Image (spheres, grey):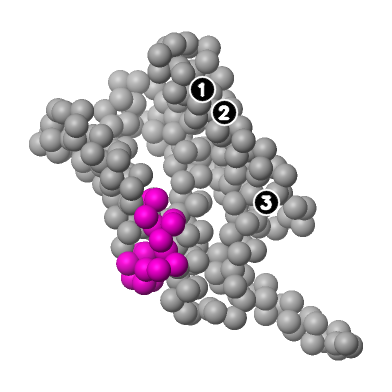
Amino acid sequence: MYQDPIDQMVTSQSIAAEQASFMTKVYGWMTLALCITGITAFFTATSQELVELLFSSRWTIWVLILGTFGLVGWLTMGIQKMSATTATLAFLGYSLLNGLIFSSIFLIYTGGSIALTFFITAGTFGVMSAYGYFTKSDLTSIGNIAIMLLIGVIIASIVNIFMNSEMLYWIISYAGVAIFVALTAYDTQKIKEMNIIGNEGTAEDRKEAIVGALTLYLDFINLFLFLLRLFGRRD
């Protein structure tokens, strides 16, 4: 069926505009979640009462860790059945719980090295996310390789808990940085393409944006943590 070139151009422009609007929402929610995590972590670390409450017992921190895993699992697997408001609150609640857990980094590393690592992470993330958004290349194969390597890093990290190998620690750290650099580009491309054209402003659009924001939030946080192992200076 013949389609006028002008109509084709208008259609492609409208799709691009909606995708840009969708990604703006994704980055907005991701940024809000990162702010909640960072502010919560900082103020928790500066409160002696909260530090004692969280880290005086291993049970407390394990409850928080299991809570974050449970919350992110519930959000990712059950988002289709929940309302947009519930999904939003679950996502923001997850970022707050992470802030409580990550307050420990302020007790281990210097503030200057944390700030430096954050800016390195932000710059690296920004470049790779922009690449994933604008590239015409299909990054699926790169993403699949990165996911397989990530499984290997997780297994190696568990093994190193018992081995306590310094060499393996550094190998895992550099591999983790490379993996999440690749995943940032891959996930950005995947999120851009998962947007359903025509549902802008609906509850489904909000939930899609939350899922995308969660994915990129996790990429950013993990990239930051691996870079902190390389650049962080201990108190």
Residue situated in front as seen by the camera: 177 or 208: 208
Three-letter code for the amino acid on which mark 3 is drawn: Tyr
Three-letter code for the amino acid on which mark 1 is drawn: Ala
Task: State the residue at coordinates (79%, 81%).
Answer: 9
Image: magenta residue range: 72-88
Under circle 2, the secondary element is: helix
Give me the C-alpha separation between circle 1 and circle 3: 29 Å
x, y percent for residue 131: 67, 51
Visible in this render: residue 98?
Answer: yes
Residue 200 lies in the magenta-colored region:
no
- Quarter containing the N terminus: bottom right
Three-letter code for the amino acid on which mark 2 is drawn: Gly
* Label pair 3/2, CB-CB below 8 angstroms: no
Is residue 16 placed above or below 103 in the rendered structure? below
- Give me the disc on residue 131: 3
Residue most extreme to the left: 49
- Give me the disc on residue 152: 2
Under circle 1, the secondary element is: helix
Residue under label 1, please give it: 156
Choose mark 1 or mark 3, whichever is in front: 1
x, y percent for residue 168: 52, 15
Task: State the residue at coordinates (50%, 52%).
Answer: 215
